[in-house]
Image (cartoon, grey):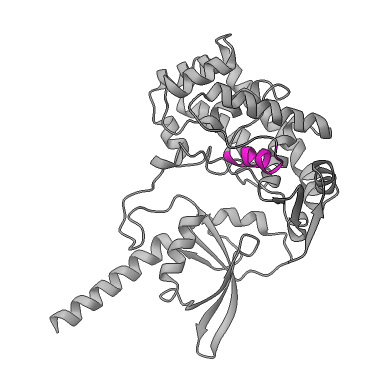
Amino acid sequence: MSEIRFDSEKELVEGIKQSQVYKDFSSKYIGPKIDREKEAWRLLSEHRGQYTREILNQVFDTVDLDPNNKRWFGSLLAAPNRNLILGSEPSLINQWFEELLFSGKDPLVSLNTCMKQFKIKGASKGLATLLLYLSNPEKYSIWVNATQEGLIVLGRITDLKGQDWGENYTQFNSEAIDFRKNHGFLPQETDWFLTFISSIESEDNYFRVDEEALRSEPITIPGDDESDIDDVVGEPMELRVMRWTPTNEMGVVALFIEFRKQLGFPIIEVIRTRFPDAAVFESSSKGYIRRYIEFEFRSSSYRAHLKTKRRCHYVVCWENDWKDCPIPVFELKQRIPDIIKMENDKLEAQQCG
């Protein structure tokens, strides 16, 4: 792995701006991102006080789905977290949004009110500050774990703890805006920059960046909040290593590792965070053949990788919602229950015999 060293925040940001990953983001994604956010705010303003499940689904999809139909904010606005939010009473949801966006109160006071008094399951700092940001991108920044970690890497803040949401957000937002203004990029780029920086190693007043990361596809914003994920589970299902169905790509990886031999891949060579996600060996009559696998929660997410020149042999997913996928798909939702049933039947036959 080749690394590049940057000796200051200014050098780091300039290095990112010169990278292919930033050029791809700025040329392909920033324009649609700005348009999506403006449209989402228009919908929020137009339907003020009358939010229904249908309207909020439209708002969430508008702000979240990028040109490749991939979710910009990861789990924040995706199922099942979205289902937790929309499972609350409509009157509570409307009260929550009204307090935060239209009450005329200091938004930092309203943030505390929403987070402490008008609690909505699945709605934490990520959703609240995203809504504030949509109302005024120049004034507010999106506060999720990844953007917070980016400021920590830069040495601008320390870990924000305690339950005073308004006070913590004041500190986070002040530094995020100062960071953006110091380096002259758009408000709509702040979440992207901070998320990219969150994965960088800092040490002794310098930063070390994997050169490969500067060439890869534009990243999305993982919008998980520590207070959101405690209740996020799938449907009850006995899957040996899991008692619930997976809700994200990591759950798919865990199931694949557990059932890899039954799926025909007895040896894992490497699992990584760049495309393709894994190199494995597939058993065949000729011996073992190296194969490359991309893990997805739903197979349709593989569309984002169609333009890559790197090879991939299989998509392994929980749910196959893309029947015309150009490469073979392993749908674990169907395969694993069949594997478990077959093994249980075999064990029962042995015990009876």
Image vertical order of residue 195 relative to residue 287, above or below: above
Q: Is residue 349 left or right of residue 270?
A: left
Q: Position of residue 260 (x, y in %)?
A: 45, 72
Image vertical order of residue 177 relative to residue 83, above or below: above
Q: Position of residue 317 (x, y in %)?
A: 50, 60
Magenta stretch, main secondary structure, is helix
Whether residue 230 is visible, yes or no, is yes
Question: Is 154 inside the magenta-drawn segment?
Answer: yes
Which residue lies most toward the bottom here?
286
Whether residue 47 is visible, yes or no, is no
Q: Quadrant of the C terminus?
A: bottom left
Image vertical order of residue 38 relative to residue 66, above or below: above
Residue located at (62% from left, 33% from top): 63
Q: Viewer-proximal residue, 239 or 155? A: 155
Residue located at (58% from left, 8% from top): 104
Highlighted range, magenta:
145-155
Q: Is residue 235 left or right of residue 126?
A: left
> How many numbered marks, from 0 up?
0
Image vertical order of residue 169 relative to residue 353, above or below: above
Which residue lies most toward the top here?
104
Q: Position of residue 191 (x, y in %)?
A: 68, 37
Q: Quadrant of residue 182?
A: top right
Q: Quadrant of residue 322?
A: bottom right
Q: Quadrant of the N terminus?
A: bottom right
Q: Is residue 199 left or right of residue 60?
A: right
Q: Position of residue 303 (x, y in %)?
A: 63, 55
Question: Is 289 inside the magenta-drawn segment?
Answer: no
Which residue lies most toward the left here?
352
